[in-house]
Image (cartoon, helix red, strand yellow):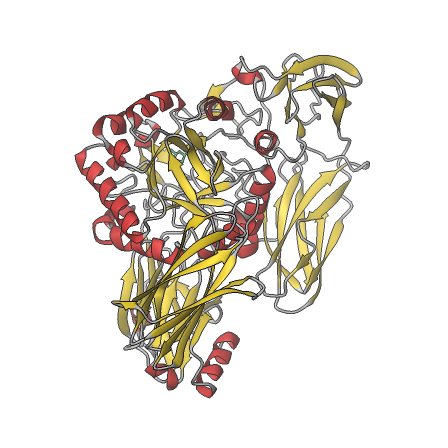
Amino acid sequence: MNKQLFLFLLLMSNFSFAQRTETLLKDNWKFSKGDFEKAIDIDFNDESWESVSIPHDWAIKGPFNKENDIQRVKILQDGEKKATEKSGRTGALPYMGTAWYRLKFNVSSQSLDKKVLLHFDGAMSEAKVYINGKFVGEHPYGYAYFYFDIGEFITEGENTLSVRLHNEPKSSRWYPGAGIYRNVKLIVKNKDAVERWGTTISTPFVDKENAKVIVSTKTIGAVDKIVNEIVTLEGKSITKIESNDKFGSTFETILAVPQPKLWSPETPNLYRLITTTYKGGVETDQIKKTFGIRTISYTSEKGFELNGEQRKFKGVCLHHDLGPIGIAINRSALKRQLVLMKEMGADAIRTAHNMPSIEQLELCDELGLMVIAESFDEWKKPKVKNGYNRFFDDWAKIDVENLVRATKNHPSIIMWSAGNEVPDQYGTAGVKRAKWLQDIFHKEDPTRPVTVGMDQVKAVMANGFGAILDIPGLNYRTHLYEDAFEVFPQGFVLGSETASTVSSRGVYKFPVEEFKKKKYSDLQCSSYDLEACPWSNIPEDDFILQDDKPWVLGEFVWTGFDYLGEPSPYNEEWPSRSSYFGICDLAGIPKDRFYLYKSRWNTKEETLHILPHWNWEGREGEVTPVFVYTNYDKAELFINGKSQGIRIKDKTTRLDRYRLRWMDVKYEAGTVKVVAYDKNDKVVAEKEIRTAGKSHHLKLEADRTEIMANGEDISFVTVSVVDKNGIECPTANIPLTFSVKGAADFRAVCNGDATSLEMFHLPKMKTFNGKLVVLVESKNTKGTATLTVKGKGLKSNQVDLKVQ
Ligand code: GAL
């Protein structure tokens, strides 16, 4: 029996007064691919099945195969006129098919008198849940929250939980992953208690003196009194209120927080609400909810305001996969992504195109990132044959309700999104669906507005679809922003999805020109950041709108990180199997574009970034343009000490407004130096890059050298090939091997190459343009762990981690 579960049961049997226990069902699951109807039976023998822990992604270990979910389709959103073979569209990983999970768990006799809920944060997908051979319920949408009251299915002693999941091919436009990839919880509480998701906290009035915190508490059973107390995260009591005014099953209380510390991306202050319920003077339940105090408003006069201050979203869209570990939720992998985005200066994310995980929202609350929580990529009209269109009629209302109920108290969420580029943008039925969904959001949560990311801008201007939304969100189509602003009544427009510039880390192509849908024989894209898709654009086109149009609410760049699947512009070319859109690559290593956004968004730090690298043997004397991404307006470039001239940002020229470009530089090995000047021509900063010599040894940089001994914390170690002087070798593609000893394990490795077929979970991989990232995961025991990295002809290296 799993240790946690055992402790929990011990607790339940010895202390029957324990009011509420929430136990993660993490370990000791059995798993097998294939359809085993008999797996629902209590006495089914699963000994030969694989033992797994949840969260789990059954498809991430591959292998990659062109035939996995090969889609012969035309992508209408991309303007395609005829069907072609798309090989890597869903990542070329084996996510399709049926699989079963089984878990034995014990129930004490005391639990039988209580409310017992089995909760899933999400399961990919078409979950059917059985306990002791009986069907409990189902939930098809892989990104949805759901739970069952399992009181009538459990018995004292051992119980058998069986979960059947099924993924149809052609059910996604990206790698959806597969399995019980988010947490599963067993909740045992009294029958007189707070209802699941029964607490709703809002902060409608805030000033320096006081914040009004309204708490509505829905209860079950015969609760006759509640006490709501607000405390600091350290537990210091701030205010407390008692109420026995019950309206139906709900208690409404208003609490005042004096001199409130507001939540914002810059000051992510949080509070905790403790709700205690009573029946006949006896305590029956207690729950704790973290929340933040903040106000949001969207008006045609001032656009978006957070806590009364106008601001524009500096946002990125994030897909749900975590690169080399697939979709299995992992807090440290999520945190690394969000920390990198914050370092770049982003203040918001859009969970595209899925319902966010609780872990992601908790991290956004803590770190300070605003969130557009999205729900669907499809309504009733299909984008992919077996997508959500099959479930929309029966499940959309439930899925939206569950999303809002499960996540509404997160201060980070500042907007809901009902959908992304749904084909229902066409036609009156779609307009009705938009209104219907928006109304469900409003009914569940009157405090936040609703958007839809729209790409059929002319259609939604004509048919009223865009006009009925709280926030009209435009995906790309920068040439239509003005028209949309004129036609729509809201008085503002949101760049719900922007850019989709494509690039491969460390790859530069010549001549340097702007291109749409440019393809190269190596299936890579150029990092001069001038390449996009037919529907998309380079970052400048969005910057200009953000800067020149006060009515644009901000932008959400596609995407913060490369993700598995959707390898545009190489949808038809094998072995491309992951995206090129990321500001960071699939390994989480920043591409050049990171610094272009940083130069604009992170105004607290200096940015002075030179591209390309300076190892162009064979290009001597050839034109090799140099770009500098910087927050400074003026700089001079030197090649081996020779000035190449001064460049000044020029507001009147699209390509010179945000980057400094030296287009005529001729390559010669040596040094590239940039010197930035202030308005008075005083030198304010310098940066130099150099041509690297032969690969010599390996540099290892861990994002964290201390990790927690919890069996899931990950240190991300960036490995770079360097020459004898420690200069990074930007063209080195060298096979490396990895081993971890001590209190951690090797978990995965990724080099960010969208065409690599090497598997992430095996301890060997080639560097891609000199780099890769190794993921080292803690065990449950404290101690030291050592990662050793070796490569032929290179001096090996190692890094020690403290696991505590
Ligand atoms: C958008 C879409 C995204 C992604 C992106 C690529 O139209 O919403 O999911 O496909 O294009 O540019």
In the rendered image, the residue lying farthest to the left is 428
Q: Is residue 792 visible?
A: no
- Residue 429 position within the rendered picture, expressed as x and y whole percent measured from the top left: 18, 38
Camera-nearest residue between 20 and 174: 20
Q: Is residue 649 visible?
A: yes
Q: Residue at x 51, y 51 (%)?
A: 209
Asked if residue 514 is positioned above or below residue 362 in the image, the reply reads above
- Residue 591 position within the rendered picture, expressed as x and y whole percent measured from the top left: 59, 34
- Residue 444 position within the rendered picture, expressed as x and y whole percent measured from the top left: 30, 53
Asked if residue 270 is positioned above or below residue 781 in the image, the reply reads above
Camera-nearest residue between 741 and 764: 741
Is residue 666 rendered to the left or right of residue 503? right
Asked if residue 59 is positioned above or below residue 734 in the image, the reply reads below
Camera-nearest residue between 439 and 645: 439
Ligand 1: give its quadrant. Answer: top left
- Residue 770 position within the rendered picture, expressed as x and y whole percent measured from the top left: 67, 37
In the rendered image, the residue lying farthest to the front is 209
Q: Residue at x 39, y 26 (%)?
A: 535
Camera-nearest residue between 686 and 381: 686
Is residue 716 rendered to the left or right of residue 683? left
Is residue 580 rendered to the left or right of residue 737? left
On the rendered image, what quadrant is the C terminus found in? bottom right
Q: How many marks?
A: 0
Q: Residue at x 78, y 38 (%)?
A: 726
Q: Quadrant of residue 572?
A: top left
Q: Quadrant of residue 403?
A: bottom left
